[in-house]
Amino acid sequence: MSFATVDFNNVVTIANLICIFVSMLLGIIVLITSIQMRVHNSRMGWFIASICVVMGGLTFQLGSTQVYSRIFFSLVAPLFGLYFIDTEREEGQKWDGKFWTTVQGLFSLLVLILALSEIEEFFVYSAFLIQYMVVIVMLLVSSKRIRESIGFLLACLFPITTSLVGMGGYGLHFMGLGIIMMLLIVFFGYQMDMERELLERKVELTENRVSLLMEQIHPHFIYNSLQQIALLCDEDADAVKPAIFNFSAYLRKNFEALTNEKMIPFSQEMEHVDAYVALSSILPSRNFIVKKDFQISDFYLPALVIQPLVENAIYYGLSMSEKGDEILIQTKEEKGYIIITVKDDGHGKKTEISTQKKHKSVGTQNVKTRLSLLCDGEMTLNKSPQGTEAIIKIPANKAVKK
């Protein structure tokens, strides 16, 4: 063996070691960052699994066990396919990627067979090359918006390039680095998606807050309240001061809620509800009572989600019905959710006019939007001849103080 050959082998060994250490360093940084992210969905789960598999392959490569490292590397493409499938589904595209995942799984099996057979490296890396060519074809076929898949396509060029280097037969094993670079670009793309989604949610929340202001501080309610307080001055002077305090508390809670993007304690929301009920009781409407059954009260929720439902129950459930005089507010924890129920027993002939229906509809939609944006919650309405029941469901892990 000549000196030049020995020197070249040393250079190749050093290059491979540098590549492994750089890849592992990048992999550890991306892995730690992705684990610490607040959003952990199935899409991010597949990404973390891909990073772990690559790290496993690099560990075997560091121990000079090329066979097992290649087997690990071959598993990344199917996992990346699953990541991309979830990406498409999150964007609302109805695309079934089972076919592509199956194809990638077959190529992983092929790499496994070739690696265990200790066949020439050229064929093993050829299988890797085909794997990522299939990924590119999958991206082109599945994505309806090619411009948004440019990042994915560019990322795939790294494992394709390292596959070509491996096919050269120089002993350079850079496959791990190529895959890590691909996942690094994908991670940056994921971060950009999250930033864009966060911006869209903020815009939607701002628009919802303006709409909520228009609906919640409606002039006719303020006008009627002030008129009734004025009448109390002649009819019941002792009730004027509490009425003014309730009116002040109602307005203050509304304006506080409209400037608060964070979750508030349930007790704070109920203070607003109580102020609204006390204020409503002085207006000319049906007599009613509010019952409470709280199995759980130590949780957080978006502001102004219960009060609008109580308002609907008073003015569109009881006041416009021939029968009914009771509103029930319940809370409980069930199957990982905080469940809040607002139910009235108003039933009979309704006399709701179109403008009132519109106001109620907009108020209900505001509640749904705030729940969805701030805590992934949801609200459903169940109407029956016996009354209306509004049910709020908030994931228990989102109903805690951040």
Image (cartoon, grey):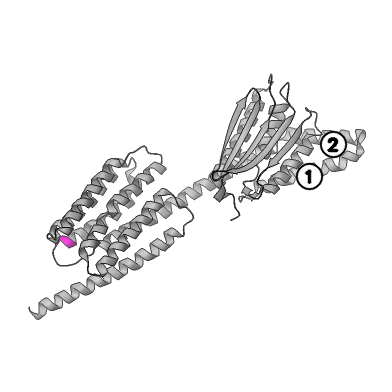
Query: Looking at the image, do the residues carrying marks 2 and 1 touch, with CB atoms under 8 Å apart?
Result: no
Tag shown at residue 248 = 1
Location of residue 95 in the rendering, given as x and y in whole percent from the top left corner: 34, 38
Give, as a three-letter code, the residue at label 2. Answer: Ile
Local crowd at mark 2 within 10 Å, few (<14), some, or many (≥20)? many
Location of residue 18 in the rendering, given as x and y in whole percent from the top left corner: 27, 72
Sequence-first tag of 2 and 1: 2
Along the line of sight, which residue is nearer the eye, 50 or 353? Answer: 50
Residue 14 shown left or right of residue 248 in the figure: left
Count of all numbered marks drawn on residues in the image = 2
Element assignment for label 1: helix
Give, as a three-letter code, the residue at label 1. Answer: Ser
Q: Which residues are magenta?
A: 165-169
Location of residue 253 in the rendering, given as x and y in whole percent from the top left corner: 71, 46
Give the dominant element type of the magenta stretch: helix, strand or loop. Answer: helix
Q: Which residue is mark 2?
A: 229
The reply to whether the magenta stretch includes residue 383 is no
- Quadrant of the image occupied by residue 316: top right
Q: Is residue 151 above or below residue 223?
A: below
- Spot the residue most to the bottom: 3
Q: Quadrant of the C terminus?
A: bottom right
